[in-house]
Amino acid sequence: MNMFRNAYGSVPVQPRLAWLFVWVLSGLLGLAGCALPTPGGDSLYHRLGDRPGVAQLSARLIDRTATDPRTRRSFEKTKLGPLKDSLADYLCKEADGGCPYEGETMANSHAELGIQAHEFDLMVAFLREELDAAGVAPADKNELLRRLTADRRDIVQAGTTRKAP
Ligand code: HEM
């Protein structure tokens, strides 16, 4: 029997028991580590389906907006693949997924496009439909739309109120 000395005096400790204690403790800490939230953990991003979810949303939204006759004019000179990737990063960041977004600000990236209010509203309507099609819960859908449309003033050319054709 060994004696283990601490601030409170000496206590008898079986060496094997001490090792067992250390082993169990490290196992418990490991389990706790697994339970810690990973980036994006219980976030809006996670509820959107993590990377596969936002990548699909981004791709479907760009495909629709870039082909619909009412919105496609802005995309004529744009490479859609990189735009889909950049939008997916942006959606991840906005939904608290922790992704680095390396693109331009909303004001800079749309500055030359002269986007009209009705084009913006159509894109938001497409996104709403794609979120429904993906089975995203109404509260999560509305939260994402709220966050994205906060930048409306930066994206829509000032003073445009023309109605959709
Ligand atoms: C909530 C609305 C919108 C969001 C969140 C959004 C987001 C983005 C993002 C993240 C980029 C990439 C910027 C970069 O990589 O530097 C981008 C670029 C672009 N967006 Fe939007 N956008 C919105 C509305 C619109 C609308 C309404 C249109 C047109 C109908 C549009 C057309 C474009 C185009 C053409 C580009 C590429 C510009 C280029 O080639 O440099 N966006 N947008």
Image (spheres, rainbow, N blue to C red):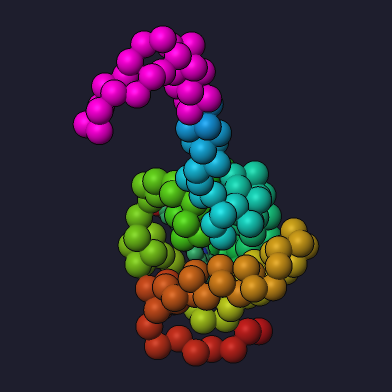
Residue 16 part of the magenta segment: yes
Q: Position of residue 110 (x, y in %)?
A: 41, 65
- At 36% from the left edge and 11% from the top edge, which residue is drawn? 2
Q: Residue furthest left?
A: 7
Q: Position of residue 154 (x, y in %)?
A: 37, 73
Q: Which span is picked out in magenta?
A: 1-26
> Is residue 55 in sight in this rendering?
no
Residue 106 part of the magenta segment: no
Q: Position of residue 132 (x, y in %)?
A: 74, 67
Left or right? Give the position of 85 relative to 63: left
Q: From the viewer's side, name the closer residue of 59 and 23.
A: 23
Q: Quadrant of the C terminus?
A: bottom right
- At 56% from the left edge and 54% from the top edge, which residue is drawn? 42
Left or right? Give the position of 112 relative to 45: left
- At 51% from the left edge and 38% from the top edge, which residue is drawn? 32
> Is residue 42 in sight in this rendering?
yes
Q: Quadrant of the N terminus?
A: top left
The quadrant holding residue 18 is top left
Looking at the picture, does residue 61 appear above or below residue 122? Answer: above
Q: From the viewer's side, name the closer residue of 139 and 107.
A: 139
Q: Position of residue 75 (x, y in %)?
A: 54, 58
